[in-house]
Image (cartoon, rainbow, N blue to C red):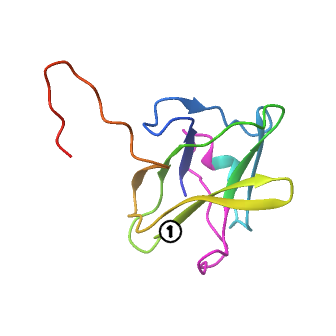
Amino acid sequence: IRTMQFFADDACTDPLEAVPNVTGEAFASEASDMTGAEHIFALRSPRGWESTEACEPGECFVGFAWGEDAGREVRCVLLQQGDDGFHAPGIKLQRASGDTWSDVVTWSPVEGGRAKLAAACPARPTVERAEVSP
């Protein structure tokens, strides 16, 4: 994963500040040399995070634990992955409560490159004298 950004809304317009060692801690499963979870939240960093080996489903993870204001809810994720063969084809968003992890949403399939992943579809817009098709 090259970059990852979290948002508080399904439209990805309200960013949640995830700055390692400032607003919380980045964490991940074992990373290859010169990569690490802290790099994926530095949006201008070319390093990102890369696993040491190919991951079976559910083996590898990256995340962010917010410090004082732990009540944040992630509703959308923007991420940049590698292309063909160097990306996760499915991604699960989880939330921790103490030592217990619960699933929020699973996205599959996820293509390589840039992806915008919302927990739910954004609400239909309301525009005077307009009709929105389903």
Say whether residue 26 is visible: yes
Between 109 and 38, which is closer to the camera in this rendering? 109
Q: Say if 52 sits above or below 46 in the image.
A: below
Secondary structure under the numbered disc 1 in the rendered image: loop
In-front residue for pair 65/29 = 65
Residue 105 locus on image (x, y percent):
55, 58
- Residue at numbered disc 1: 88
Q: Mark yes or no: residue 35 visible.
A: no
Residue depicted at x 49% and y 68% = 90
The magenta-colored residue range is 40-61
Q: Amino acid at mark 1?
A: Ala
Question: Residue reaching furthest top?
Answer: 128
Which residue occupies 52% across, 29% down? 14
Q: Residues within 10 Å of mark 1 (few under 14, many from 20)?
A: many
Q: How many marks overall?
A: 1
How far across and down, in percent of the image, does residue 24 sit? 78, 39
Q: Residue at x 39, y 46 (%)?
A: 121
Q: As drawn, is 62 to the left or to the right of 126?
A: right
Does 42 appear in magenta? Answer: yes
Residue 110's place in the image compared with 12, above or below, is: below
- Point 66% across, 70% down: residue: 60
Quarter of the image that includes the N terminus: bottom right
Of residues 116 and 80, the one drawn nearer to the viewer in this rendering? 116
Residue 65: image location, x then y, percent: 76, 46
Q: 103 or 20, which lies in front?
A: 103
Residue 71 magenta-drawn?
A: no
Q: What is the chief secondary structure element of the magenta stretch?
A: loop
Position of residue 126 measured from the top left corner of the image (x, y, whole percent)? 27, 25
Q: Is residue 61 left or right of residue 87?
A: right
Specify the quadrant of the image occupied by residue 51: bottom right
- Residue 99 relative to residue 19: left or right: right
